[in-house]
């Protein structure tokens, strides 16, 4: 079984459509929405759809904005408890094309990858409708990570990822420290250091058309300093 984890905060414009898009794919895809008390009623929209997708659509509600990283860690643990084989990270705003979930799944299930990354930068720069300054910041952040950590991944901050079950079982999820977008770097680096095979799958990333971005300068600050800390950490597989 495959589980797509989608964290949400004020995504009422996108919630129903992104769920429908994933549910319409071939294959056994389930969706777990993790909502951080969205005041716009996102969770209510999801609840209203659960009878439409019985046993396939799930919702975890949290009391407030607790960070992207903690949302995914909560989802990973839930996925392991419920027996999923492949677990995906994906944004709610259609920046990631739901059809590309199949390509990430194939990279892991058929092509031998343990972790597949939907990559904006492994085949040039594949980003649509971002201001140039943001592209430079994002691409520069990934270059910085490659230089500091030596990890051969072009899109280290990517949030469109497929994990095989054994990767999530092998990483000590309780030891993951970064809570914002630095979490994406930490998870990939930890998997790479533990010897798991990481494969980048080229995608086209499209800026959101509905709703507002949750990015902030503090997110990049945590990632900048956190990467230096990662360079000096030791990693071992979870028992």
Image (tube, helix red, strand yellow):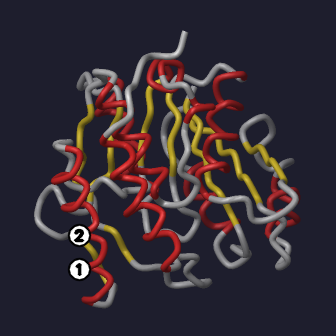
Image position, residue 54 (x, y; %): 81, 39
Figure check: 188 above or below 196:
below
Residue appearing at x 34%, y 26% in the figure: 114
Q: Position of residue 232 (x, y in %)?
A: 33, 38
Q: Residues within 10 Å of mark 2 (few under 14, many from 20)?
A: some
Q: Which disc, if any, is residue 97?
A: none
Kindly identify which residue carries mark 1. 136
119 vs 236, nearest the viewer: 236
| Label 1 packing within 10 angstroms: few (<14), some (14-19), many (20+) | few
Q: Viewer-proximal residue, 25 or 34?
A: 34
Specify the farthest residue to the left: 124
Residue at 28% x, 21% y is 195
Find residue 139 and name its label. 2
**Which residue sits at x=59%, y=84%?**
212
**Vertical relation: 51 (above or below) 207:** above
Q: Circles 2 and 1: CB distance less than 8 Å? A: yes
Q: Which of the two residues, 85 or 225, is positioned nearer the viewer here?
A: 225
**Image location (x, y in percent) of residue 155:** 26, 56
């Amino acid at each position: 079984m495959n589980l797509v984890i989608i964290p949400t905060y004020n995504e009422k414009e996108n919630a129903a459509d992104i769920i429908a898009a994933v549910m319409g794919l071939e294959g056994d895809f389930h969706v777990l929405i993790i909502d951080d008390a969205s005041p716009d009623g996102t969770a209510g929209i999801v609840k209203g759809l659960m009878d439409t997708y019985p046993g396939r659509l799930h919702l975890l509600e949290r009391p407030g904005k607790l960070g992207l990283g903690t949302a995914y860690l909560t989802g990973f643990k839930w996925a392991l408890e419920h027996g999923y084989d492949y677990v995906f990270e994906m944004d709610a705003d259609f920046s990631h094309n739901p059809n590309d979930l199949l390509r990430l799944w194939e990279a892991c299930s058929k092509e031998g990858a343990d972790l597949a990354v939907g990559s904006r930068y492994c085949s040039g720069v594949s980003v649509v409708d971002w201001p140039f300054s943001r592209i430079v910041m994002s691409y520069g952040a990934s270059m910085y990570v490659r230089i500091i950590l030596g990890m051969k991944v072009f899109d280290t901050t990517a949030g469109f990822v497929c994990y095989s079950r054994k990767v999530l079982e092998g990483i000590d999820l309780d030891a993951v420290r970064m809570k914002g977008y630095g979490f994406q770097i930490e998870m990939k680096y930890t998997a790479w250091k533990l010897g798991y095979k990481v494969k980048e799958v080229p995608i086209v990333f499209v800026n959101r058309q509905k709703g507002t971005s949750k990015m902030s300068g503090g997110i990049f600050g945590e990632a900048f300093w956190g990467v230096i800390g990662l360079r000096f950490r030791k990693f071992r597989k979870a028992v």
